[in-house]
Image (tube, rainbow, N blue to C red):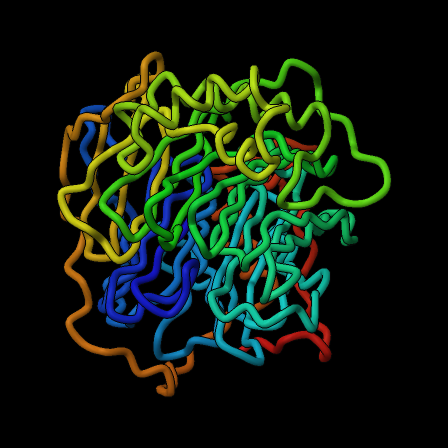
């Protein structure tokens, strides 16, 4: 979940502030003209700055591994170089250079993924060795991709086409292609995994319909309609940790929250062809979509600015008269409506969202490229309009344009043994939920970079 102010949805912040929530939405990072900043959420709905690099280097990408000390950074001066740091020690662990501009960096407890316009590089997070490179991907100038937070279901999703909404799913642990989803008729705009890695949310460039799929079963579980009056640019999708809610932000002043009701029957893989974007995936998928519509109807009147109550009423009547309506009309009316909504005091060009708990109370967080963080109360029982609780100013937006052709001054490289020790220490704050102990030096073999792999500076 990341935000840039200009070039791409998940990438560099041309003209704005790069903001990204960490994998469990307990903290957020921001890139500024002076370096990168780490913020923690406090129990009183506040925000505390816990670290500022003050490096003087304009930072366009930054990501933190959960609550550990491991931070991945890309600067404007060296957009092809990835720098992995131990922020508490203020030291660089290692760095890698690539053939093109880095558009996105994704982390979980097993893998680090670097996205270029036409390739993806998968690193082992334990020693930063490159395990696999996905080459010749369709042009992806916005760096759109999503890595599941779960280490045991470590799936990577990325566009399979630049023309239609096809999603490629790659298993980043076993290093093989898992499946392909035909999610939308138009190009993809946003992707998001649930915390368990079993569900993938997608949105197209039209911005009107949001779909949720079961992976790897390729079953469409839910379908939601954001609005009917206009097409918008979806900038972020985000699941809650429990998987019950899905938030969507765009270039409008409204942030929508959808409730994911469980389908009455467990999803089953569809035999033969893949699920088409326009029709019902299967009997289980159709019933799940109807269930989603019922869930959204409870808060549709108050939470959906552009749908109105009449669509919610018609949605509830579709089941009885579906056989009398054209298929396309029935599909539209059966789509779920927003369960809740938040009204931003500004209309941002882009906004990032997260759903988390602060003191056991559900909160909707909205961060913008202009440096504001809005904290809203989310009524998990009744939905409706979200009340604005706090407004925080994180950073001031960049006052000057970026120049990407500058070169960063060379940084001293650590010896392999020192780098290995630094990486292990940085990962201590986020032990994996698997057989490996990231705090055990025996699990960190010396790092060796092959000549054919991206070279270290």
Give the residue displayed 34% in from the left and 35% down from the top. Answer: 256
Viewer-nearest residue: 293 or 124:
293
Q: Position of residue 97 (x, y in %)?
A: 54, 76
Residue 129 x, y percent position in the rendering = 66, 62
**Could you tell me which residue is drawn at 49 percent across and 76 percent down?**
101
Q: Is residue 385 above or below residue 135?
A: above
Residue 352 appears in the rendering: no
Residue 436, quarter of the rendered image? top right
Residue 222 visible to an observer of this rendering: yes
| Residue 281 left/right relative to 64 | right
Identity of the residue drawn at 36% across and 50% down:
20
Residue that sits furthest to the right in the current view: 272
Tell whether 138 sits left or right of 146: right
Query: Residue at left 46%, top 17%?
Result: 316
The extreme front residue here reads: 324
Image height check: is 156 above or below 134? Answer: above
Front residue of this view, candidates 418 and 367: 367
Question: In the rendered image of this protein, does residue 3 appear above or below residue 140?
Answer: above
Q: Quadrant of residue 440?
A: top right
Residue 305: percent from left, percent from top: 26, 35
Query: How many marks on residues?
Result: 0
Q: Position of residue 17 (x, y in %)?
A: 26, 60
Q: Quadrant of residue 201?
A: top right
């Amino acid at each position: 979940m990341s935000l840039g102010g200009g070039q791409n949805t998940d990438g560099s912040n041309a003209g704005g502030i790069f903001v990204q929530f960490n994998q469990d939405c307990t903290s957020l990072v921001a890139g500024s003209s002076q370096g990168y900043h780490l913020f923690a959420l406090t129990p009183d709905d506040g925000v505390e700055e816990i670290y500022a690099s003050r490096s003087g280097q304009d930072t366009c990408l930054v990501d933190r591994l959960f609550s550990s000390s491991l931070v991945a950074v890309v600067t404007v001066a060296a957009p092809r170089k990835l720098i992995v740091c131990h922020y508490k020690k203020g030291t660089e662990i290692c760095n890698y250079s690539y053939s093109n501009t880095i558009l996105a960096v994704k982390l979980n407890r097993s893998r680090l993924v670097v996205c270029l316009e036409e390739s993806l590089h998968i690193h082992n997070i334990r020693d930063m060795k490159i395990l696999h490179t996905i080459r010749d991907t369709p042009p992806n100038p916005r760096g759109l991709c999503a890595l599941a937070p779960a280490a045991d279901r470590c799936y990577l999703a990325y566009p399979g086409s630049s023309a239609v909404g096809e999603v490629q799913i790659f298993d980043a642990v076993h290093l093989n292609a898992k499946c392909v989803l035909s999610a939308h008729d138009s190009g993809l705009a946003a992707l998001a995994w649930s915390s368990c890695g079993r569900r993938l949310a997608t949105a197209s460039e039209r911005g009107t319909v949001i779909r949720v799929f079961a992976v790897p079963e390729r079953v469409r579980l839910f379908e939601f309609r954001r609005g009917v009056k206009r097409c918008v640019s979806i900038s972020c999708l985000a699941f809650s940790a429990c998987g019950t809610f899905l938030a969507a932000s765009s270039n409008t002043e409204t942030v929508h929250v959808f409730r994911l009701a469980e389908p009455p029957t467990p999803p089953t893989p569809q035999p033969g062809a893949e699920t088409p974007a326009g029709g019902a995936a299967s009997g289980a998928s159709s019933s799940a979509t109807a269930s989603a519509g019922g869930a959204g109807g409870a808060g549709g009147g108050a939470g959906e600015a552009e749908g109105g109550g009449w669509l919610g009423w018609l949605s509830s009547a579709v089941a009885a008269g579906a056989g009398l309506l054209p298929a396309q009309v029935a599909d539209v009316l059966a789509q779920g409506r927003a369960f809740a909504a938040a009204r931003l005091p500004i209309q941002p060009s882009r906004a990032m969202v997260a759903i988390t708990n602060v003191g056991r109370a559900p909160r909707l967080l909205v961060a913008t490229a202009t440096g504001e963080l809005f904290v809203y109360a989310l009524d998990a029982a009744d939905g409706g309009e979200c009340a604005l609780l706090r407004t925080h100013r994180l950073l001031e937006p960049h006052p000057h344009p970026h120049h990407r052709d500058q070169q960063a001054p060379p940084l001293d490289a650590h010896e392999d043994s020192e780098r290995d020790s630094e990486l292990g220490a940085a990962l201590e704050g986020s032990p994996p939920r698997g057989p490996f102990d990231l705090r055990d030096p025996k699990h960190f073999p010396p790092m060796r970079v092959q000549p054919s792999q991206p070279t270290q500076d």
